[in-house]
Amino acid sequence: MPRPPLEVADLIRAAGSTFYERSQKWFNWLHLKILTAIVRCRTSALGGHVDECSRCGYRAISYNSCRNRHCPKCQANARDRWLEARSRELLPTRYVHVVFTLPAQLAPLALQNKREIYRLLFRASAETLLQVARDERHLGAEIGFFSVLHTWNQKLLHHPHVHCVVPAGGLSPDHTRWIAARPGFFLPVKALSRVFRGKFVAGLRSLHGCGKLTFHGEMAALAQPTAFSALLRSLFRSDWVVYAKPPFGGAEHVLRYLGAYTHRIAISNHRLVRLEDGQVVFRWRDSAHKNKKRLMRLALDEFLRRFFLHVLPKGFVRIRHFGFFAHRRKAALLPLCFALLNAATEPPCPTPASTDSTHTLWTCPRCGGPMQLIERFSASDARLRGPPSAQRQS
């Protein structure tokens, strides 16, 4: 894929060194760390390496990436590594996609308590799926799935929700057979919505009672138990949004589908159109009008403010596994699932990756031959003597 004409790093540079001063009300050390990483990503500031084609001798310079999970440039490689690891765990059955969304009135509370609220969102949605699936009136099976946290909508506004990808079936209570969901159906959405709402509100009440929630600015009044109880009561006045997409194909389609969800960030560089007169223009998909592609224009500072709304707390895990996919259980239960689905008792072991550090995973743009790493250079090397010449031929 060609490099996009405009990147988030370009927008940060255009905002200038005074951006921090203009954003002191919300900008913190973690935002600064991520900002710095994005600007330095794949530049000489992080060092790099020289690769040479083993056939024609063509040489190319590659600068190192920052590997920050909020960086638009670094997610493709992280996604490919994750999908490769997960490919051995895909069951030969249909999969379904369920989305749990927090109501809009809880978004400000989530912004001030990201770690606690996002953790509760994972727990409440997972417990809901496991409980409803175990119910004999619905599926009557023990299921497994993984969940991915997203905190944005197409306009970059704060919109916390969890995507759950679930095999369309599960293990019987005695683990002797596989119970498949009915064709075209998995679990009742209304039951999922009500159970999810009850579990999340109970979790909020517990967090408040333990003093684990903080309230600032206009939300300071919610620190009082009476005001917080009134907020909780209002959450029962409407149904919560739980969306179950129709089941899609088997394992051969799952990896392609997952790539669009697992390692996404708030906006990719390819959605950026232009920067003009201090305004950022980017593409967005209007789901209310048949996903029609539209253009949005935001002031540069407002665009960056929305982008940094979606910074996750340090160390927070945004992809989690539950049920028979949980790390402590899958060693015993996944082979059983494969066996009951008339597949191999164990998924095929991957071919061990080469440990030779002189090889790269890309080919020569001229002749298609394998590129070999021949030299590494640090950021200080680049400053002292400049990066090695990529035009020099052996």
Image (cartoon, rainbow, N blue to C red):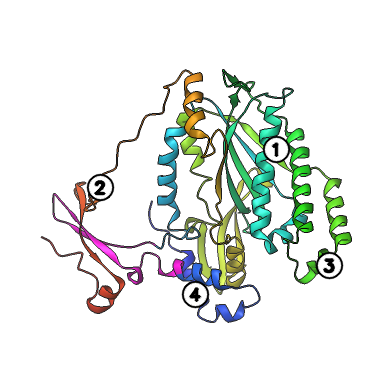
Between 88 and 263, the one lying in front of the other is: 88
Q: Which residue is mark 1?
A: 128
Q: What's the magenta region? A: 37-65
Between 295 and 219, the one lying in front of the other is: 219
Q: CA distance from mark 4 to mark 1?
A: 45 Å
Q: Is residue 341 visible?
A: no
Residue at (80%, 69%) from the top-left corner? 220
Q: CA distance from mark 2 to mark 4?
A: 41 Å
Residue 167 in the image: x percent, y percent? 56, 30
Task: Work out whether mark 4 precedes mark 1 in sequence or the reverse, and give the earlier one.
Answer: 4
Q: Is residue 321 visible?
A: yes
Q: What kind of residue is marked 3?
A: Ala
Task: Work out whether mark 1 precedes mark 3 in sequence or the reverse, and give the earlier one.
Answer: 1
121 displayed left or right of 219: left
Mark sitting on residue 221? 3
Between 40 and 128, the one lying in front of the other is: 128
Between 326 and 146, the one lying in front of the other is: 326
Task: Work out whether mark 1 precedes mark 2 in sequence or the reverse, and give the earlier one.
Answer: 1
Residue at (61%, 68%) from the top-left corner? 305
Q: Which residue is mark 2?
A: 355
Vertical comparison of 352 with 234: above or below: above
